[in-house]
Amino acid sequence: MKRIKQGDTVEVIRGNYQGVRGSVHRVLADKDQVIISGVNIIKRHTKPTGRVRTQAGIIEREAPLHISNVALVCPQCSQRSKVAFKVQPSGAKARVCKKCNETIE
Ligand SMILES: [Zn+2]
């Protein structure tokens, strides 16, 4: 189970976008990276190559950030928080905010 899920609000804690909050657009689980809407925008200069039809020009898109460079923002207390895991009576694992001890869905 990952600490960060798609749809979570996270805060960037390292790099150029430090302190910026955004929602997780996609989790690249195999690389431990996340793509956050509006964060870490890179410009790609693309040229049409060969027979493959690619759009030429400058394309802006979000580059993935490593999961260790973002912190989850707790939806209950809206503080940036570490995540603990708790086994619920049903046996399922739940994420818990270490600041306010509320369960995070
Ligand atoms: Zn909290």
Image (tube, rainbow, N blue to C red):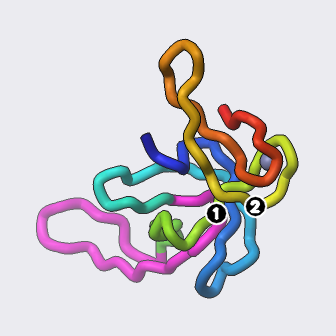
Which residue is nearer to you in this view: 10 or 22?
10
Q: Amino acid at mark 2?
A: Arg
Residue ID at (62%, 51%): 83
Residue stretch rendered in magenta on the structure = 35-58
Disc 2 residue: CB within 8 Å of ligand 1 = no
Residue ID at (64%, 63%): 71
Please state the horizontal and vertical placement of residue 82, each as a whole percent of the image. 65, 58
- List the residue tagged with mark 2: 80
Please state the horizontal and vertical placement of residue 35, each as a whole percent of the image. 51, 59
Pointer 2 or 1: first along the chain? 1
Q: What is the C-alpha distance between the residues marked 2 and 1?
A: 6 Å
Which residue is nearer to you in this view: 55 or 9?
9
Farthest residue, direction left = 51
Q: Amino acid at mark 1?
A: Ala
Q: Is residue 74 magenta?
A: no
Please state the horizontal and vertical placement of residue 78, each as a whole percent of the image. 84, 52
Residue ID at (43%, 40%): 1
- Side of 32 relative to 4 (left or right): left
Q: Is residue 55 magenta?
A: yes
Mark 2: secondary structure: strand
Q: How many marks?
A: 2
Instruction: Kindly indicate whether the residue at mark 1 contacts the one at mark 2 (C-beta within 8 angstroms).
Output: yes
Q: Quadrant of residue 80?
A: bottom right
- List the residue tagged with mark 1: 71
Farthest residue, direction right = 77
Please state the horizontal and vertical placement of residue 88, each as a whole percent of the image. 58, 22
Question: In which quadrant will I find the C terminus?
Answer: top right
In the depicted structure, whether residue 44 falls above or below residue 105: below
Mark 1: secondary structure: strand
- Side of 29 relative to 19 (left or right): left
